[in-house]
Amino acid sequence: GNKLFTNVPKDVWTLTGEIAGKAKADPKNANREIISLGQGFFSYAPPQFLIDAANKAMSSNPLNNQYAPTRGDLQLIDSLKNYYNQFYQKNLTNENILVTTGANEAILACLIGILNPNEEVIVLEPFFDQYISNIKIPQGKIKYVTIHPPKNLSEGKHTGNDWKINYDELEAAINEKTKILIINTPHNPIGKVFTKEELIKIGDICYKHNVKIISDEVYEQLYFDDSLKFPRIATLDPKYADITLTVGSFGKAFCATGYRVGYIISENAELLKYAASAHTRICFSTPHPPQIACAESLNLASKNSYFEDMRNEYDGKFQKLMKTFDALNISYTIPQGTYFIIADFSKLKVPFDTYHFPEDIASKPRDFKLCYWLAVEMGIITIPTTEFFTEETISNDKTGIEYLLRFAVCKTDDYIDKACERLLELK
Ligand code: GLN
């Protein structure tokens, strides 16, 4: 049959999971642990206050184990209002918040709620892969606008600012069918944080053409420039607030990606209603105990230095990895945010033509082969980044995106140390 998700290549998360399995089974790794810096999940426990709050939520009131209100547990909606009121110009009310089953469902609910078949969505490339299927489910069409990589990607160090949008290209991609633009900041996988100036340009173009914005800000707590506040597009201008749905996630904020608690905030309650109607039909409501745990944890974290401490910890983890890349003469984009770093492995001598790659890897771009080789030969799991680009971009590329691997640092310091030690063997 002509189903949306049959006969399509395996997604990168499944594929790298299988690669990890093959690496583990390989005799070369018999005496060492497989180090996973691939998918962005944590190698350590969430903070104890979150676990305590989750346990308490389940045992203190039997009703906490029953359906949560479809728009979210009221305690959590209150916490979100209290927390986000510091950023928003309007005083947020319950109608401005929707709790979702992870950020992925948040984005899906926005798209199902707002898009009519054949309407278009602007996706900035590279993109988080889930956006694509989330747009296809309500039969939307995708227009890609490139975040242009720095020209000398394989030399020296870059920052997120070296990855740039061309605003003429953005405007040219818009037509009467364009309904939505999705932006991700801090950006997975580049680690770019869009500046206020960039967001104003994007916001103005969207406002002018009546395009709504989904701003995926799930890594908002992981923003490493202490001198500036993390720029949120919805808070920069009331015009943008009115067209924007901002998506957040507790998985990242509280190191608990398995809780699947995300949310949408919009000053435009009417717009959010569409997403809320879709959310009711997608999953009815979000698991209840983790919502209560997140509510209490957010109240607590906003009164102490939890988020700041977390940022400092990540800074240390990134430093370790960047020092290792420097020693190996590997160029990379210095992360301004997220827990990811992308690095260029074009100098790694992998025998692409003679090495035995399994069939599903052999047909893929070189980053998949680099990923496979690093997994089997070194016991290190990474994410090949061409998964976040279109085939057209990959085949026309002259900057070397085919050699970029993504490393996740949401791991203990010991774990990162082990990874660095292992990587240094490549010297
Ligand atoms: N956000 C996670 C990452 O980029 C992946 C989530 C998922 O598997 N869909 O690693």
Image (spheres, rainbow, N blue to C red):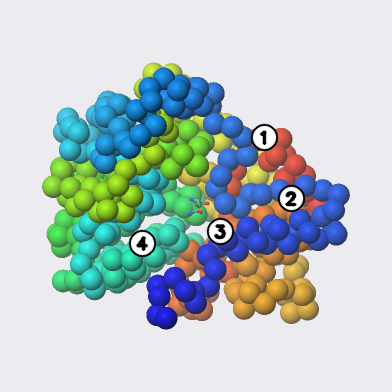
**Does residue 244 show up?**
no
Name which residue type carries label 1: Asp
Give residue 13's mark.
Answer: 3
What is the CA distance from the residue labelled 3 to the residue labelled 4?
16 Å
Question: Pointer 1 and pointer 2: residues touching (CB < 8 Å)?
Answer: no
Label 1 sits on residue: 413
Q: Is mark 3 within 8 Å of ligand 1?
A: yes
Neighbour tally class for label 1: few under 14, some 14-19, many 20 plus, Cα within 10 Å: some
Q: Determine whether, in the image, residue 312 is placed left or right of residue 27.
A: left
What element does badge 1 sit on?
helix
- In the depicted structure, whether residue 177 falls above or below residue 128: below
Viewer-proximal residue, 124 or 93?
93
Label 2 sits on residue: 34
Q: Residue at x 39, y 52 (%)?
A: 104
What element does badge 3 sit on?
helix
Q: Earlier in the sequence, mark 3 or mark 1?
A: 3
What is the CA distance from the residue labelled 1 to the residue labelled 2?
16 Å
Q: Earlier in the sequence, mark 3 or mark 4?
A: 3
The C terminus appears in which quarter of the rendering?
bottom right
Viewer-proximal residue, 316 or 210?
210
